[in-house]
Image: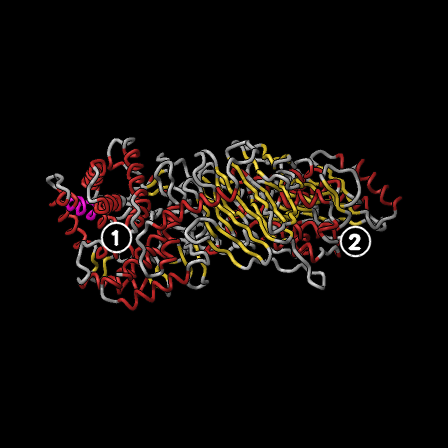
Amino acid sequence: MTAEALPAELRRTIVQLARTPRLLVACDYDGTLAPIVGDPSQAKPLPESVHAMRSLAALPTTTAAVISGRALRDLATLSRLPAEVHLVGSHGSEFDVGFVHELDPDTTHLRTQLQRSLQEITAGQPGVTLEAKPASVAVHVRRAEPEVSESVLDAVRSGPATWEGVQVTEGKSVMELAVVETDKGNAFEALRHQVGCTGAIFLGDDVTDEKVFSKLHGPDLGIKVGEGDTLGHYRVPDTPGVATVLALLMEERRTWLYGEQAPAIERLSMLANERTVALLTPDARVTWMCHPGPDSAAVFADLLGGQGAGHFSVLPAQPENSDGTPRSTLPLGQRYVPGTMTVETRWSRLLVTDYLEHGGDSHRTDLIRVISGSTKAVVEFAPRPEFGQVPVRMTAEAEGIRVHGTSEPMVLYSPAVKWQITSDGMHESAHAELTLSEDSPVVLELRCGTETLAGSDLAEPERRSSANRYWSEWVKQLRLPKVETDLVVRSALTLRGLCNTDTGGIMAAATTSLPEEIGGVRNWDYRYCWLRDGAMSARALVSLGSTEEAEAFLDWLHRVMDTLPGPERLHPLYSLAGGTLGPEAVIDSLPGYAGSRPVRVGNLADQQVQLDVFGPVVELATDLALAHGKLRDADWELVKGMAEAVTWRWFEPDHGIWEERDVPRHHVYSKVMCWVTIDRALKLAAHYDRTPEPGWAQLREQIAEDVLKNGWHPDVQAFTTAYEGSDLDAASLYVGLSGLIDPSDERFRATVTAIESELRSGSTVYRYRRDDGLPGHEGGFHLCATWLIEAYLLTGRRTEAEELFQQIVDNAGPTGLLSEEYDPIAERSLGNHPQAYSHLGLIRCAQLLDE
């Protein structure tokens, strides 16, 4: 029996249940896993069912169990299921290898009397057998003639079945008498409670299984095997049907959990309009987009949950080979239109052009998809607002589709496209087949934040030209190095795309929860504005000749500080609007990228102490003043605030640049950046005729002496991570990169060598290799590699710098984007994408190598 033979509605229900966060799969044994046979001792399970149960039990957040009337020892011997599959025997009275209940003497005596009475009743009755269990005795009459069977069962019903303390359970050709409470339904409920499941399936054929079916609720699924009245939701005819159901559930669950089709992170391309972002796969599937802002809930979360979590796909209709098999529809390539944030994906006779409309209302997100060519194409539109947790309904109208059930209005403007709307039981999706001609492209406009399905005042080509012109005109003003110019342009556009034009905030990255280790738990939400990251991004753009982002960011920071009692109370990060973050939460309905859970929203680093954040802000104000030839009064006030914060707190331990979820330490990098804060403030005061605070000069010397005394570890011959240990950290390179000591100082050169030796691996550099209190591992950081390149240059090692820079360039995706990390063993990118740190580091290195 194949999955296609199952009723379509049952298949849809199985697919839906496979996506529950914590799944319980339970079934009966005889008549379900194993066919009914004359000799119960020969009831062997179907190998296909055993394989499926074993595979399900091995999956994360998935529990498999068999609940049978058989004695537990017999059940274990016959089924030969692995220990990962829970076995519950005697209708729920046995949960372990030993008997669950401790029988008191009176109950033991009753059990003995019960067995003697039943032996007397069944003695000499052909085809009748007794099965003794720890707390019960079962009378089997399957092999007896009907007259004998009925006579024996009547005698049992009128005799020992009426005794006080005896519980009777009747099944198919079997009657069980127990001296403790037995109920499959109660056993099932105990399992549900134990594993905390969010959805369950139970399959059974016996009347005793109805007690389980009666306990099912919500997303649970009950399947009756064979004929007879039932409370089950669906029915399969026999044990091969059970094997088919279990196999389908296992495949769907595994696919959902592990994201077998997860695209390589570095191959994702970002669309942006300075208000929000969207990510495209190499085959033009919108795999990630949030609304109303980039740090809002996702409308399309395919990236973290597969297509069931929302996607918007365009593909050529699959042609067939001569043997009738579908031909590959992989695209020929994907690229950005040079100097813009518009992405083109091309097949042989199909071109899909994507961009986010620029300059519209702040409450709207308009994604434009232009489909052109001379072939047939298929479109799948499956929005899943609120990370797929809100049921979606759609109605098709002449001008497009309306999406219902969302807090924000949403429409798909698509005149003349004929849509077919289908449902998976919770969500609806829209499907269309397009016949394209060269002179009439099809335009699809996803409009979030509006209900209008009216045409735009401007034709699509004009709007695309306007968006492209905005980006390309901005690029023209940049001062670009001659080293990797195109990649620097893409990095600059990426940083600009992470800026928010309404608030001035700058995102650290476009995504949440892309893993630092495939299958691991190091999955963080970077869709917010870190003081450090934002200042460093804006500073990179200032170095290229664009200052408006820096001005807007510093204005954003002014507004944040207006809400605080003092600058020393700054949080490390804020929302793009400048507000504090809510609590970090987990979206457990999403399995994560390639099975990397949990998926997080929010970031606990919001509550950390990170004393390095003041330095980058002052450095940005310094570079902006140099670019303008003057220091804004408001920026000087900001600099004084940062210096005041350092004065109050520089001597405290903190959580450091890497936001370790461990006890605070006296991090060398944090102390260095406190020194940078005071040093740059003094230089600004001298250069722009401002009055420094009287104690700044002494404080600068005090911090420097503290770092040199406590940060240098003579046994390691390097500046270490923190005063308290001997472990190394790439961020300690800033002792020399910042100017606290001269790069020619032997202590800095030794630190460079030590970090190269311990933390560099091929084309990447790890942050550190210490135990940071979290399980698992991570990749090397592109930013750390760029720091090492700068250190190589400062210590006269240009050849090594050029080689490492080229390796970073080679690790960029085909459209020029860099994620946070790189795994040199698996040769794949890791972490959130695209990452501001990586791109600002690349820009800095290209400029240095161009000097």
Task: Give residue 638's mark.
Answer: none
Q: Position of residue 538 (x, y in %)?
A: 31, 46
Q: Position of residue 703 (x, y in %)?
A: 17, 48
Residue at the spot 34% in from the left edge and 64% down from the top edge: 804
Q: State the residue position of label 1.
A: 722
On screen, 368 above or below 328?
above
SS assignment at label 1: loop
Q: Nearer the viewer, residue 182 or 539?
A: 539
What stretch of residues is rendered in magenta?
Answer: 674-683
Residue at the spot 70% in from the left edge and 43% down from the top edge: 10
On screen, 387 above or below 767?
above
Q: Is residue 222 left or right of residue 630?
A: right
Task: Report if residue 656 is visible in the image.
Answer: no
Q: Is residue 675 within the magenta segment? A: yes
Q: Quadrant of the C terminus?
A: bottom left
Q: Is residue 270 left or right of residue 243?
A: left
Q: Nearer the viewer, residue 382 or 96?
A: 382
Give the farthest residue toward the bottom: 799
Q: Position of residue 347 (x, y in %)?
A: 57, 57
Main SS of the magenta segment? helix
Task: Report if residue 146 is visible in the image.
Answer: yes
